[in-house]
Amino acid sequence: MDIDLGITLLGSAVGAVWAGFKSSDEYQRVQRLRFRKALLALESGVERTYQAYVKAIKAGRADGRLTEEEKARARSLARTRAIALAKEAGVDLLRTIGEDYVDVWIAKLVQKRKG
């Protein structure tokens, strides 16, 4: 019984310390910095993909438009490049932004770039 009580108290103490740390200003500052680095990697991935892939396709077309397949490939390239850039900066992009939200952010950045 004493061991169970000790484990419970230790677990409670560790949980309290962790909760206190996560609510600290320093932890919040680190999280904001990580998020900014992740967004910068996304912006850079979108821009580099535009310069290396999209721009060449648009220049070769009279209407300057990409097919749906080319758009999907461009988004995939931007995602892959952004993940690599974030990793170089020491940030796990998918964990920081959220795997389900990376494509949403890429779409927003593409729209922002268009106009």
Image: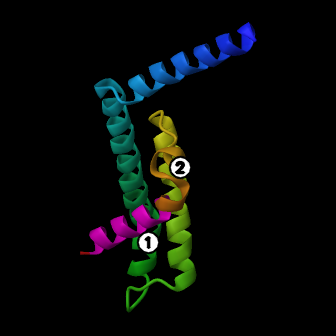
Q: Is residue 104 left or right of residue 1?
A: left
Q: Does the magenta portion include 81?
A: no
Q: Secondary structure at mark 1?
A: helix
Please say if the residues under marks 2 and 1 sit with CB atoms less than 8 Å apart.
no
Q: Which residues are magenta?
A: 102-114
Image: 9 above or below 51: above
Q: CA distance from mark 2 to mark 1?
A: 24 Å
User: Depth-wise, is mark 2 or mark 1 nearer the camera?
Assistant: 2
Q: Check disc 2: other Cα within 10 Å, few if <14, some if 14-19, many if 20+.
A: some
Residue sitting at x 48%, y 59% = 102
Q: Decide which of 104, 40 is in the foreground and name it.
A: 104
Mark 2 sits on what residue?
94
Q: Residue 111, percent across and down?
A: 32, 73
Image: 8 above or below 115: above
Q: Decide which of 26, 67 is in the foreground and name it.
A: 26
Q: Residue 50, percent across and down?
A: 40, 66
Give the label on residue 2, or none: none
Amino acid type of the residue tagged 1 in the rendering: Val
Q: On the image, which quarter does residue 52 sit in?
A: bottom left
Residue sitting at x 44%, y 35% = 89
Q: Decide which of 15, 9 is in the foreground and name it.
A: 9
Q: Is residue 32 left or right of residue 79?
A: left
Instruction: Return the disc, 2 or 1, that comes first in the chain's sequence.
Output: 1
Image: 11 above or below 97: above
Residue sitting at x 37%, y 41% = 37
Total count of labels = 2
Its colouring scheme is rainbow
Mark 1 sits on what residue?
54
Amino acid type of the residue tagged 2 in the rendering: Leu
Q: Main secondary structure of the magenta part?
A: helix
Q: Residue 55, percent across and down?
A: 39, 71
Residue sitting at x 53%, y 49% = 94
